Amino acid sequence: METLFFGTSDFAIPALQSLTSSKWRLLGVVTQPDRPRGRGRKVAPTPVKQYALDKHLPVYQPESGAMLADLLRSENLRPSVIVVVAFGQLLKQAVLELPPLGCINIHPSLLPAYRGPAPVQRAIMNGETRTGVTTMYLSPEMDAGDLILQESAPVAPGDTAGDLFARLAGLGAEMLGKTLTLIERGEAPRLVQDQRQATYAPPLTTEEETIDWSRDAACLCNLIRGMNPSPGAHTLYNGNKLKIWRCRPDDGAPDGNSGIEPGIVSDADPRRGFTVQTGCGQLVIESVQPAGHSSMSAAEFVRGYRVRPGLLLGG
């Protein structure tokens, strides 16, 4: 069985690694064009392209979805099945119809829940305690194709989006082999999604990145976890952006605001870090990143920036 892999981000690499070491012949890798990335905004290859080049795999980078079908035909690429993982764009019908055994996708949620581009981040931000991975047949509509396999996974209280992405990527890679085996045998199920149960995970917005200290501590902790490692939730410290990377609700703090304004630093210790009052409960800050500097522990921030109780964070 011949395969063709479509992917772009780091999430796709474990699946690609699994495919390159499998019994199925990999014809090549399709990924997004090189674009400016990182703080310096230098043009760089996608993570999937870099991995493919390191493994001496053929790489194809069509400039648009409209050019994709023509590229595959011109290169005489005739895969039995196309594997799509975190590719970054919907496939046109002409591409979906190209492989005789279909196009399959690995999606990091238990579909039909959390369709869309940010399922891992939204699951954490919504306080979910379980999520999972789905393999499915692609359809023209986003994440609406027939299901093949699903496996659930826990969301630990301290998980960031980065932590959960890594675990789900590994789980998805394991499921890919099982899925392809079923397809090869003609035994893969096609379970129609219940559209009534569908929920959407929209992309993160710049407005959501700003911490609103009037919200309760648990919700803010989920927001900060879901925004880690990108784009990062932030507040203001003396008028400058301060990213909050890790935190936890203070279980010993009284409920409510204790008469303290949300956003006020209620405790600061050069050995332990600092605590911030929220609209309900308090948040223990564990890791931060001041503007123009590297991330540091909250204790380092207290010592280096002279953080004191009574300081107001935010607008």
Image (cartoon, helix red, strand yellow):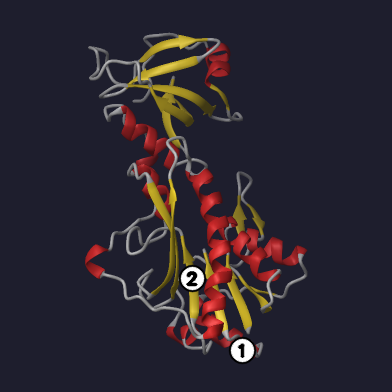
In the image, 261 versus 99, the foreground residue is 99
Of labels 2 and 1, earlier in sequence is 1
Q: Is residue 280 left or right of residue 57?
A: left
Q: Residue at x 32, y 59 (%)?
A: 113
Q: Is residue 135 above or below residue 216?
A: below
Residue 314 rendering spot, x and y as whole percentages? 36, 25
Does residue 231 lie above or below 238 as drawn?
A: below
Q: Amino acid at mark 1?
A: Arg
Instruction: Judge whether 83 appears above or below 252 on screen.
Output: below
Whether residue 148 is visible = yes
- Mark 2, Cα crowd under 10 Å, few <14 / some 14-19 / many 20+, is many
Q: Which quarter of the rendered picture does the N terminus lie within?
A: bottom right
> Badge 1: few (under 14), some or many (20 or more) residues near its Cα, within 10 Å?
some
Question: Which quarter of the figure has residue 197?
Answer: bottom left
Disc 1 designates what residue?
A: 78
Q: Is residue 205 visible?
A: no
Q: What label does residue 105 carry, if any?
A: 2
Tag nearer the camera, 2 or 1: 2
Q: Is 69 situated left or right of 118 in this image?
A: right
Q: Nearer the viewer, residue 65 or 43?
A: 65
Gap in angstroms between the C-alphas marked 2 and 1: 18 Å
